[in-house]
Image (tube, rainbow, N blue to C red):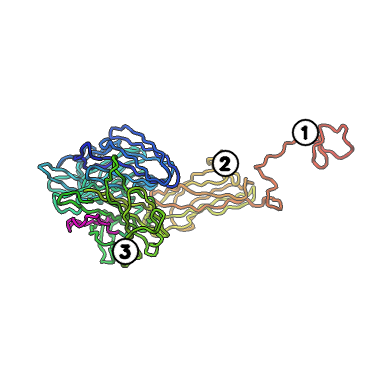
Amino acid sequence: MPPNDNASSTPTDDSFVSLLVATDDVVTDVTVLARQRSGKTDTIRAKVPPSTLWEIRIDDYDLYQLQGIERLGGASIDGERPNPASINVLTSNDVSLYAVLRARRSSDAWLVLPTDALSTDYIVASYPSEVSSTLGATITYPSQFVVVATQDSTKVDISLSVDRSDRQVGRDRSVILQRGESYLLQARIESNRRDDLTGSSIASSKPVVVIGGHRRAQVPILAGSASRDCLVEQMPGLETWGRQIVVPPLVKASDHFLYSVDDVSICRIIASKDSTLVTVNSQPAYLLNKGKFWDLPLDVPLVIDATKPILATILDRSANRTGGQRLGDPSMMVAPPTEQYLRSYIIGCVGPNSAGGQIYSEHFISVVIPTVAVPSLELDGTTSFTATSNTILSSPYSVVSTKVASGAHRLKADSTFGVFVYGYGGAESYGYTGGMAFERLNDPVIRLRALRTAGDPGQRDTIAIILDSIDTRNLEGLTGVRNVRYRVTFDASSFVPFEDGIIDTGATSLRLDLSANVSTLFPGDTIGLISGIHTLGLTDSSQILVDSASWFTGNGEAIRVNTRYIPGDLVTTSVCQTEVGKRLFDPRVAKPPVIRGYYDIRGQYVGPTLEGLPVGVYFRR
C-alpha cells in the first residue's frame, strides 16, 4: 500500500484498504495473506459465490500502508529499504481483482495484475510533487512508486528520471528483495524543487509488482491551494505496451458546471524507447525519447499512434479549488492499447462504506469499441441499456459511456474492446482500467517445432527440434542471443533415447532438459537432435512436446523472448493389426499364464499327465 494522505482522518472517517474480488460462474475460495509493516501476517479467508463482487475490507489502515515523507526537505520513514508490508491474494479459480486505497477525501483504485502478467521491466507513470501551506502548516505531496518482489533473492535495479530521491543523491540504486518485501521510493521535495518520477525505469532479475502514483496530487497544477487526491495504478510491463491507444474523455460528474474552466483532465503519453514519433488525431508527429512524456488536455477523444511502444495514462481533474464538496477529484488510469483489448470483462464499482452509506455517489463505465460492434455490446446480459455513443472521427472506433450502480458488472461484445471504470464522491474519486489481455506484444516471438518422427520398432532414428519461424516485428530484441535451454517430453515406450532423462513413473513420458549454442537465427535452423531407437510403444502415435525455452547471451545474461511451441508426432510403424485395426500384440495387456503340463494340438491345456487321455498328438510345455 503506497502512502496516502490520511493525516486529516478522524476515528469517524472511513479509511481502509478494500479488495474487490469479481468471480465468474463458480464458487471461489479466497485467501488473503496481509503482512503488516511489523512483519506480522493476518490471514483472511472467504468463500465467494459465483458471479459476485465480493469485498474484503481491511480497516487497520496504518498497519499496512508504507510511511512516506512527513516534512519539507525531509526523508520518508520507510523509503528505500526492504519492508515486509505486502498483501498476497490466492484464489482457487481465476478472478478479477481490484484494490481501493481510501482516506478521507483522498482515494483511488487499481486493477491488480495476476503474477503471470508481471514483468521484469517497467517505466513509472506519476505526476509532479507539490507542497501545500494551510494555516501555517506545510504538507508534502511527493511523486512516488513502490516495488514488490514475488520471489526470493530478486535483484532490482532502479534508474530515476531525476538526479536524487528523498533519501539518496544520484539516479541509480540497486536492492535485493525477498518474496513479499516492498520498496518505497519518493521524490525529494524542497522549497524550490517539485520533482516528477515519471519516466524512472525498473529492471529486476525476477518478476515484480510496480505501483506508480502520487501521495496526493492536484490536476492540473495551477495554484498552491487546490483540492487533491492520491494517484495509484499498477504499472504494466514494457512488453505489454502498445503502438495504438484510444483515450476517451471521461463523463463529467453531475455538478461539473461548478468547476473552474481550467480544471480539465490530462492524458500523459510516455515513450519506452528513444526516437519515438507520436501522432495524435492525425496531427503532426511529436518526438519523444525513452521515459519522456507529453501531456495533452483530455477534452476530446484522442487517437494516439506511435512508431514504438508507448503508455498513456488518464489523470482526472481537481474539482474543488474554491472549497465545497463537489463531486470528483484526481485519479489515475492506464489506457489499454487496442492490441490488448478483450471480448468480455467482469468489473466492479466501489460499494458502500461500513455503515452502508455510499462513498461514491456516481459510477461510470466508458467503452472504446469498433463502431460496427456497438450494437453487440452487452452490459449485464442485455444490449438495451441507457448510454451515450459517439463515433471518433477518422477512426473505426466509438466511445460508449453509461452510468451504473455500485457492484459487479459484466460486459461483452462480438469484437474486442477497452473498458474504463471510474466514480465520483464528495471531493474524491476512483478510476482504473477494466482489464487487458497483457499479451507480450514487444518481445521477439520465436516458434520451436518438433519434427514428425516415425519408424519401425528396433529402427534407429533422431528426433529433431527446429526454429519454425521468427516474428520480424521485434528482431532487434534478439541481438546477442547465443544459447537456448529448453525441454523436450515424449513417450519413452515408443522411443528410447541414447541419453539419460527423467521418466514420469506414473506414465511413460520421458523429459530431457537440453541446451544448444546458437550462431544464427533463421527459420529451419536445427537447435536439437535426440538420437535413439523406436520401440513398440503403448500406442501407434503420440506427441513430442517442446517447452520451457530460455534464451541467453554469450555472457549468460537472459534475453526475454516470447517462445511458442509446435508439437511433433511420434509414430510407430509396421505394427501388426487385425482387420478392425486392433493390435495383435498390445504390451498393455498381460500375457496369460503358462501352466506346466500337456496341451493338445489346439493349444488347450489337458492336464499334468497323459493318463486316461485318448490317443492323439500332445505337447509338453
Q: Which residue is mark 3?
A: 390
State whether residue 277 appears in this view.
no
- Image position of 595 (left or right of 469): right
Which sits earlier in the primary sequence, circle 3 or circle 2?
A: 3
Q: Main secondary structure of the magenta part?
A: loop
Q: Which residue is mark 2?
A: 507
Q: Which residue is mark 1?
A: 596
- Distance between the alpha carbons at the discs numbered 1 and 3: 90 Å
Which sits earlier in the primary sequence, circle 1 or circle 3?
A: 3
Task: Return the residue nearer the eye: 6 or 499.
Answer: 6
Give, as a single range, the part of the protein colored magenta.
Answer: 248-271
State whether residue 235 appears in this view.
yes
- Image position of 118 (left or right of 613): left
- Distance between the alpha carbons at the discs numbered 3 and 2: 58 Å
Q: Residue at x 42, y 59 (%)?
A: 414
Q: Position of residue 497 (x, y in %)?
A: 57, 45
Which marked residue is nearer to the observer: mark 1 or mark 3? Answer: 3
Q: Secondary structure at mark 1?
A: loop
Task: Return the residue nearer the eye: 469 or 279.
Answer: 279
Badge 3 crowding class, 10 Å Cα cut-off, few under 14, some 14 to 19, many 20 or more, is: some
The amino acid pointed to by label 1 is Arg
Asked if the stretch drawn in magenta spans residue 257, the answer is: yes
Q: Position of residue 458 (x, y in %)?
A: 64, 47
Q: On screen, 5 above or below 436?
A: above
Q: Residue at x 68, y 49 (%)?
A: 582
Which sits earlier in the primary sequence, circle 1 or circle 2?
A: 2
Locate the N terminus and report the quarter of the image it occupies: top left
Specify the farthest residue to the right: 615
The amino acid pointed to by label 3 is Asn
- Distance between the alpha carbons at the discs numbered 1 and 2: 34 Å
